Image (tube, helix red, strand yellow):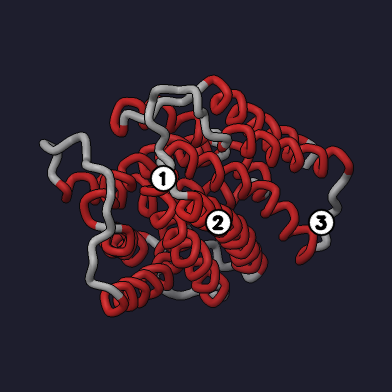
Amino acid sequence: MIGAILATFLFATSSVTAKQSVQRLGSSTANLYRLLLATTLLGICAHGWGVGFRGPSLPWFLLSGIIGYGVCDTALFLALPRLGARLTSLMVQCLAAPFAAITEWLWLDTHLGPRQIGSSLMILVGVAVALIPDRTSSIPAPLSPSHSHRRLALGLAVLAAFGQALGAVISRHGQSISAKAGFPIDPFSVSYQRIVAGAIFGAIWWSIQSWWSSATPVLPTPRHHRVPTVMWVVLNGVSGPFLGVACYQWALKHQPTGVVLSITSLTPLAVIPLARRIDGEWASRRSLFGGCLAVAGVLALTMKR
């Protein structure tokens, strides 16, 4: 449980610092820089104290990294400047739990009872309530006024949530294979094997983006000009794909996916004070109520499991 709790606070920090990095560098560049930094740090730990780049579950971890670090994080970084750190975190962390439950049901034949189905519906309702724009508030919403940008941001956040859920299920399956083969693998090595594939995906995506368009996206002006860009990248890389995911893999090694996701689903609530302090994002009462309802749904979903 300690690993999941630590991952929750680290993911909250990563979400807010990621938005600051995106505002300065653009989504693909910010994502690539933090992946390269985390790959270097994880590689030092994995080759120095772990099993490095080997093991019976290596193909599974590579696949998990392509989906989790590659598809999920790319969609996440594209959604952040359009949706804001708080709402993006809410959608990704809360929707990942029912997606993981459905994935395990379809793949591993895990039974879903009425309580789990009802909890999943509660999550969807909570997220929907939190995403309803507050037209009466005088505080600027983090969403773009363009309906097309809003739909794109929501679609990207849903894709990121599905990628996180599928990547977590595959990663836990890989750890199970390693345990049965008598080849225990440490969290840093798991994270390293996954992030290598994610970094390759990120580099390919960055190359495609650079070739496709040289135009810099119009993003909100950063609030903290005195903080160097490199500091936001380092904070994002260390708190998210390095320490955050290592703690996440540590938790998955000892707990079911649904239990781990139930704890990390509290990340959107941990993001609120950070987003308010760093990004100036204010949450309306309805948005807070929807977020709490979604988190309660995740907790109820995993209690049965």
Q: Nearer the viewer, mark 2 or mark 1?
A: 1
Q: Which residue is mark 2?
A: 155
- Within-10-Å neighbours for mark 1: few <14, some 14–19, many 20+: some
- Left-right relation of 14 to 262: left
Helix, strand or loop at mark 1: loop
* Extreme residue toward the right, this view: 114
- Left-right relation of 18 to 95: left
Q: Nearer the viewer, mark 3 or mark 1?
A: 1
Q: Position of residue 52 (x, y in %)?
A: 39, 69
Helix, strand or loop at mark 3: loop
Which disc number belongs to residue 206?
none
Mark 3 vs 1: CB contact within 8 A:
no
Q: Residue at x 76, y 66 (%)?
A: 107
Rendering quarter of residue 35? bottom left
Name the residue type under label 1.
Ser
Which disc number belongs to residue 110?
3
Q: Which mark is first along the chain, 1 or 2?
A: 1
Name the residue type under label 2.
Gly
Q: Which residue is mark 1?
A: 144
